Amino acid sequence: MSRKPLVAVLALVLLGALVLAGCRPAAEPVIKIGINAELTGDIPKVGEGTKFAAELWLEDINKAGGLEVGGKKYKVVLAIEDNESKAESAAAAQTKLITQDEVLVIVGPQASKQAIPAGEVANNLKTPMISPWSTNPRTTENRPWVFRACFLDPFQGPVIANFVTQEFGFTKAAVLYDIASDYPKGLAEFFKQAWEQLHGPGSVVAFESFTTKDRDFSAQLTKIIASGAEFLFTPQYYDEVPLIVRQARQLGFTKPIVGSDSWGSAELVKLAGRDVVGLFFTTHYAAAGAKGKTKEFIDRYNAKYGYVPDDVGALTWDAMLIVQKAIQDCGQITGDLAKDRQCVRDAMARIKDFEGITGKMTFNEQGDPVKSAVIVRINEQGEFEFYKSVSPTGQ
Amino acid sequence: MDTEARGATAAGPRAAARRWTAATRALFGEVPAFGWLLGALAAVLAEYFVGRPLARALGIGRIPLLFGVDVALRDPWLLPGTVAYMLLVYALPAAAVARLSVTVARGITERLLRLPVGLSVLVHLGLLYAGLHLWAGINDYRLLVTRLALIAIMVTISLNVVNGYMGEFSCSHPGFMALGAYVSSIITVLFFVHDSVLGPPLLPTAVGPFLFPLALIAGGAAAAVGSLAVALPSFRTRGDYLAIISLAFMFIVKSTIENVQLIGGSRGFMNQPDWAGLPTVFVWAVLCVAVTNNFVRSTLGKALNAVRDDETAAAHMTVNTRRTKMVAFVFAAFWAGVAGGLFAHVMRYVNPGTFGVQKLAEVLAMLYFGGLNSVIGSIVGAVGFTLFSEALRPLQIYKWIIIPVLLILVMIYRPTGLIAFREFDITRLVKPREKPGKVEHVAAAD
């Protein structure tokens, strides 16, 4: 049996590879930024928003001919990884971005379920990471390398309680939330705590829960109506809110319904139609009536992708700009990855009064931003209209 | 293989392929498992020492992590370089060492054969681990993927005991994993870690790694006890009923954990100590494979097959069907629990949401991809599926078109999985191979 063909194939492949390797231009220094997003799985819309916002940002950088650091322009490359909305996949993607793609800094993952294990990896491997959307305190807790771009639930809860008290003068609240999902549950508890601090124990007259993917809330709503609550707070996602609101109205609940930042999706009005007009919720930014940089971002995003960006998109945009500022503040790219990552992390921690489209941010020692919340009203056109801004230092 | 086939078109591609197979068999047929392990070790050593400069010379820059698929998918221009790398670093050294060491390997295996089989197996495992350790040591990502693949092997094999050997359709494995994960995590955190909720450690942290196996066993035991909750009411029935009850069990476990505030509820539980390194996971995976393999080949295992094929007939053949099923189910749950415990300590964070329908689908896919009623099939399924879904990462969403299509193809052409209904005989594996005389003859005539 001749073995000549095998040898020939081997030689050919090797030769081809070497020729190709020779043809490729010598690698110029680039800045690699990792994106760890939920592109598939439970929340693909979140991943899509992340990707689109990041690519929009890259467009700007490319238009400017690269990212200028210390008087030198660097080409920027995005390494986008899908974490499938799974904790273990998020950790694997994060490890891959850090060790194989050798990214300088990572944006994402968005949801806390993914951001907590990914943050562990980033912190252990000493790579700066910023999660635009994760609200669980544990994502950044005791992790000097991990930051986030959104406010936390312990802040949002009191904001809602204060707003309702001042705006409507109510004293009896009802809460309906998903006990199986960490975000609604956490926020519901923080709200309850804040409300009871304002109005005394027992002022949350109904604290009802359901489980993810439940579609019939009539039992809980009947209890809420019977409890005599003056309004309903429901920190749910855009796919559940329309059902809750519609069923509440059908059962004869005519009082206000208030929501949280998870309402902030263009899908909400599409699904709920007129039912949600006039309702209030807290969020990171208001799309309708936005001015300046915020409007510019919304218009560009809308023109390119065909819909008004959700808060995830806006927060990712801010995260990208924070990353850009940190890299530029760092002053130089030495090529020594460990040194550059340290430099970028330190620069990020130093950021003060950063003017993002979702508000002014300064990082505290945990890597969480101190920033304002926005209260929006859903207007007659179904747009999210700016109503009021609440700063963390008080009203 | 393609060039070879083209070179021999006169005899038709089929004949050429046959001749090629014969030639390969003549060359490598007598290489024992020991020789292949030596070859693999040589390949990994080659990568360890010359991988980086070679990758740079071939223009791929870095060592391709998962056999080059990720590199080639990201930039098709690098395909020749990646193929060359794979040939030079993996195929060539492995084949050369395996072939050249035939005499030595045979000598060693024969000598080992005079010692107890267990010792021989241990030597083989040692070699396997050395190769794996070096391979995974190149990069943290490989290390993580290897550990996750080993854990996937444990879960898949334990599920195979129920779904394959016992022939029932159980959906509660994520629930068992969750029980194991939480119980072992609570034990390690309570005893050895300063936690904000569970307080200061009850025992000195230094003894922790030694008591870690006990925590894992406790996790497995918890899963085993939990499995009784499914087994006791449902084993009077068969088929769909068990599937439904076990599915319900999975949701009960998930919802229960979500509602227990002390362990974080739906926010998850973290701070597990970093004790599940590659050696630990490897030892547990080997233990699981060995014990399960012995179990399914024992009288009890054969009784299990009898129950699957015809429960009434088995009962008439003096098989205690109820006890047999119960033991197998509890056994499978135990290993799923241990795997869950390891998973929690690899991730160092668990969340009840992880152990839901998605996990179930993943484990079932691994099982049916690899093959029912086969330990080796489960290993292939778990490793193959894990590597596939990692290597195809650059395709992003399209990955979830390719993997299901692959599964459908497997189901069409091999309805019971890739390597189904095959016994995994370890003692035969460690024996020296005989010279394939007949094939030798064909090769000589060529």
Image (cartoon, coloured by chain):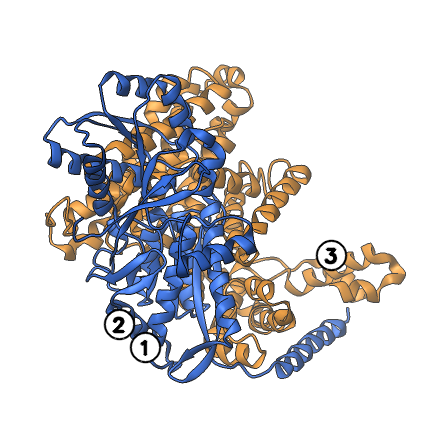
- Label 1: few (<14), some (14–19) or many (≥20) C-alpha neighbours in 10 Å: many
Q: Which numbered dot is residue A346?
A: 2
Residue nearest the viewer, comparing B116 with A116: A116
- Real-space Cα separation, disc 2 to disc 1, in angstroms: 8 Å
Residue depicted at 59% across the width and 69% down the height: B86
Indicate the amino acid at tag 1: Cys
Mark 3 highlights which residue?
A: B438
Could you tell me how many numbered marks the image carries?
3
Q: Amino acid at mark 3?
A: Lys
Position of residue A104 measured from the top left corner of the image (x, y, whole percent): 39, 71
- Amino acid under disc 2: Asp
Q: Colour of chain A?
A: blue
Q: Are marks 2 and 1 in contact (CB under 8 Å)?
A: yes
In what quadrant of the picture does the N terminus of chain A appear? Answer: bottom right
Q: Position of residue B290 (x, y in %)?
A: 41, 45
Q: Which chain is orange?
A: B
Residue B246 found in image quarter? top left
Q: Name the residue beneath numbered marker 1.
A: A330
Is the residue marked by circle 2 packed among few (<14), some (14-19), or many (20+) residues within 10 Å?
A: some
* Front residue (pair B31, B104): B31
